Image: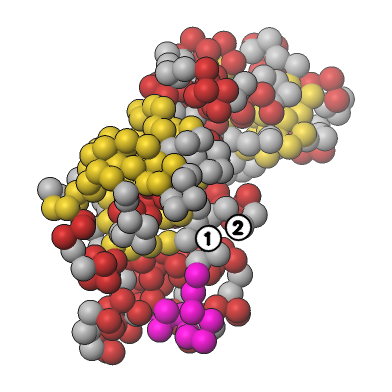
């Protein structure tokens, strides 16, 4: 565990970046520090590995004051990931990843093997090992940055807005990758961001800072969204706090039922009967493997034949009961012209549909 005891950081110009901070960061969990620019979250992060020294208080790791450790030695035991990866441009990917292991005295053979192992772990092919940073995309560079931070298998990983410089699609993929890695590695991760959605998605606990370095609320995402401590936290969470809260609730409580679904080769007459049974103006059209293709309006079906030739409106999105949140289910329902969320299994096959009313009734 990382513990802050009455920690203060005052810069020479008198600016107080962190004020009397008391904070316990749980081992093996992701703790996210969030807040507006200048609220002290990055200063707090960098005091853990002594890149910034506090002017008051103590920081302890597993009961040991970090001030009693030699800074370079301390930093080699703590992984550190920053914006835009911070890779050495003149070193290959493999050499970048091997930086700390080599400083710790590992053999080149062992360090290279570790680099290749980590490339696979962060989802990059082995042939990237001999490339240089400028030959990689921004998202690939961030993956290498994470691999480098993990190279010596440190128990603690500090991440300072590591995904903020990439586009939203890549950012979401990197967040997924981090969560997947954490399931296996169980590192103590301290993650800084200004994005509340990223904080809610990644954090086991979230600490909200206000300007002046004060910690306003430190809680699980669920409790933070359900009960903001004051008006500042409420405003910071935004007007769609209710929707964000749905992202913290699993969709597993929902029950998918048979909906107005037909295959492409269902005769039109039978398709109309199915729509009538469900009192629906829309039919969910499936391919021969029961993968949802889209929605067909009953009024637009051909007079004869089957559903194959019907115009199909795209699904929008589907969701998985055991993998997605209530927010994902709600999004699926809202994007559907029929007002029904489409649940699928891991192979993308239809499980059933869920109505907006069911989602509302199942949300705590």
Q: Quadrant of the N terminus?
A: top left
- Residue displayed at 28% across by 45% down: 56
| Residue 226 sits in quarter | top left
Residue annotated with mark 1: 83
Q: Is residue 92 magenta?
A: yes
- Residue displayed at 38% across by 71% down: 148
As drawn, the residue found furthest toward the front would be 13
- Residue displayed at 64% across by 42% down: 287
Could you classify mark 2 by the number of other residues whose Cα lies within 10 Å: few (under 14), some (14-19), or many (20 or more)? some
Q: Is residue 60 magenta?
A: no
Q: Quadrant of the C terminus?
A: top left
Task: Find numbered disc 1 in the image and state the secondary structure of the residue it sits on.
Answer: loop
As drawn, the residue found furthest toward the bottom would be 108
Residue annotated with mark 2: 165
Q: Would residue 118 be found to the left or right of residue 135 on screen?
A: left
- Cβ–Cβ below 8 Å for labels 1 and 2? yes
Q: Which residues are magenta?
A: 86-96
Which is more toward the observer, 180 or 221? 221
**Real-space Cα separation, disc 1 to disc 2, in angstroms:** 6 Å
Q: Would residue 139 be found to the left or right of residue 364 on screen?
A: right
**Magenta region, main secondary structure:** loop
């Amino acid at each position: 565990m990382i513990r802050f005891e009455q920690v203060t950081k005052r810069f020479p110009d008198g600016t107080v970046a962190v004020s009397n901070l008391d904070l316990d960061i749980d081992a093996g969990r992701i703790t996210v520090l969030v807040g507006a620019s200048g609220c002290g979250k990055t200063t707090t992060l960098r005091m853990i590995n002594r890149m910034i020294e506090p002017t008051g208080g103590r920081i302890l790791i597993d009961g040991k004051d970090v001030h009693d450790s030699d800074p370079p030695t301390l930093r080699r035991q703590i992984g550190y990931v920053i914006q835009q990866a911070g890779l050495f441009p003149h070193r290959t990917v493999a050499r970048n990843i091997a930086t700390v292991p080599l400083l710790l005295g590992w053999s080149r053979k062992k360090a290279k093997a570790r680099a290749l192992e980590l490339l696979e772990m962060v989802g990059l092919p082995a042939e990237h090992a001999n490339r240089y940073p400028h030959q990689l995309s921004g998202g690939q560079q961030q993956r290498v940055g994470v691999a480098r931070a993990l190279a010596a298998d440190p128990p603690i990983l500090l991440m300072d807005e590591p995904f903020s410089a990439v586009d939203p699609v890549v950012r979401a993929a990197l967040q997924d990758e981090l969560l997947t890695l954490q399931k296996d590695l169980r590192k103590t991760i301290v993650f800084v961001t200004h994005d509340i959605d990223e904080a809610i998605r990644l954090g086991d606990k979230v600490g909200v800072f206000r300007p002046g370095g004060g910690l306003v609320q430190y809680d699980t995402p669920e409790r933070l969204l359900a009960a903001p401590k004051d008006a500042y936290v409420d405003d910071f969470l935004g007007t769609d706090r209710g929707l964000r809260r749905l992202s913290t609730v699993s969709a597993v409580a929902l029950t998918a039922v048979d909906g107005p679904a037909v295959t492409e080769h269902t005769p039109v007459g039978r398709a109309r009967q199915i729509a009538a049974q469900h009192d629906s103006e829309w039919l969910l059209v499936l391919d021969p493997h029961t993968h949802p293709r889209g929605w067909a309006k009953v009024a637009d079906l051909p007079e004869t034949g089957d559903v194959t030739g019907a115009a199909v409106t795209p699904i929008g999105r589907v969701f998985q009961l055991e993998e997605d949140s209530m927010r994902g289910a709600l999004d699926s329902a809202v994007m559907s012209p029929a007002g029904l969320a489409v649940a699928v299994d891991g192979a993308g096959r239809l499980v059933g549909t869920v109505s907006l009313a069911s989602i509302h009734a199942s949300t705590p």
